[in-house]
Amino acid sequence: KIYDDAQAAVVQVAGEIAAAIRERQASGGKFVLGLATGSTPVPLYRELIRIHREEGLSFANVISFNLDEYFPIDDRHPESYHRFMREQLFDHIDMPDEQINIPKGDVPREEVFDACKEYEDAIVAAGGIDIQILGIGRTGHIGFNEPGSGPKSRTRLVTLDRLTRLDAARDFHGEHNVPRYAVTMGVGTIMDAKKVYLLAWGRSKAEVIRAAVEDDPVENLPASFLQAHENVSFILDTASGSEL
Ligand code: GLP
């Protein structure tokens, strides 16, 4: 779906998310929302906050699972995804803290494997992800599933691609400060979500979007595996959709 601009796109997506949350509230159940970081979902979060404030949407019945976190990183680090999510969304809505899940970037290395397994188990225990929001990296990564990630991969520790670390270098004040690893949901974890929205804005994403949508699915471009998902929407502006 190609919109005139990012704002028009997020108004539509946020409206659909709000309607799905309200529908679940009406039946007394919990709604499970998969969340993403990066600059792309920021206008979506702004729109959800507006709907919360102006239209009374409550997140009290929402359980969230974020895609990924740098490793190693302290929760309070200015560039940690824990901090990002608080600043961009959680501090502004009424979702209870105990319903927020983000992979941990500060556990000892020898405990990461078990922590990843627990993360997968928690998603299953919550009933699976109803809606998963995704951005896309210039390497074609979703979450931090870099090229080489298989379609059945699960939550795990990964090594970040050089291009991904270069893209993050400005935020971290230099490439040498960017963590070398991350903990990310796997491609298989993402594929299990009932509905997926992949968002992309701007000319710099046009070529990776074209390849993800039009080329055969390959490990070299993990977002291309979404072609096999039964309920996925690529939400684009005219610039990111310009190579299609
Ligand atoms: C990071 C995140 C991804 C995100 C990507 C793109 O690598 N782990 O989830 O999609 O950045 O970032 P941006 O949205 O700023 O282009």
Image (spheres, grey):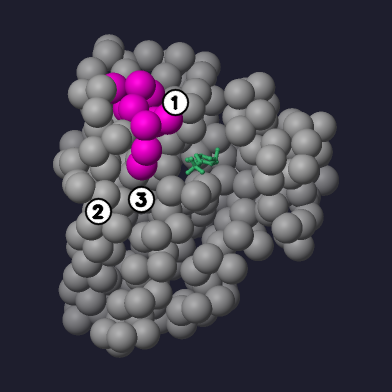
- Observer-nearest of 188 and 204: 204
Residue denoted by label 1: 140
Q: Name the residue under label 2.
A: 9
| Closer to the eye: label 2 or 3 | 2
| Left or right of residue 77: residue 87 | left
The secondary structure type at the circle numbered 3 is strand
- Seen from the viewer's position, the closer of residues 232 and 192 is 232
Task: Please say whether residue 137 is visible from this viewpoint.
Answer: yes
Residue that appears at 36% across and 85% down: 53
Q: Which three-letter amino acid code belongs to the residue tagged 3?
A: Gln
- Looking at the image, tell me whether mark 2 or mark 1 is earlier in sequence order: 2
Q: In this view, does 175 lie above or below 79?
A: above
Q: Residue flagged by tag 2: what amino acid is it? A: Ala
Q: What separation in Å lies between label 3 and label 1 (alpha carbons)?
A: 17 Å
Residue 61 position (above or below residue 182): below
Q: Which is nearer the N-term, disc 2 or disc 3?
A: 2
State which quarter of the image contains the C terminus.
Answer: top left
Q: Which portion, as a residue range, is magenta?
A: 201-210
N-term-proximal mark, 3 vs 1: 3
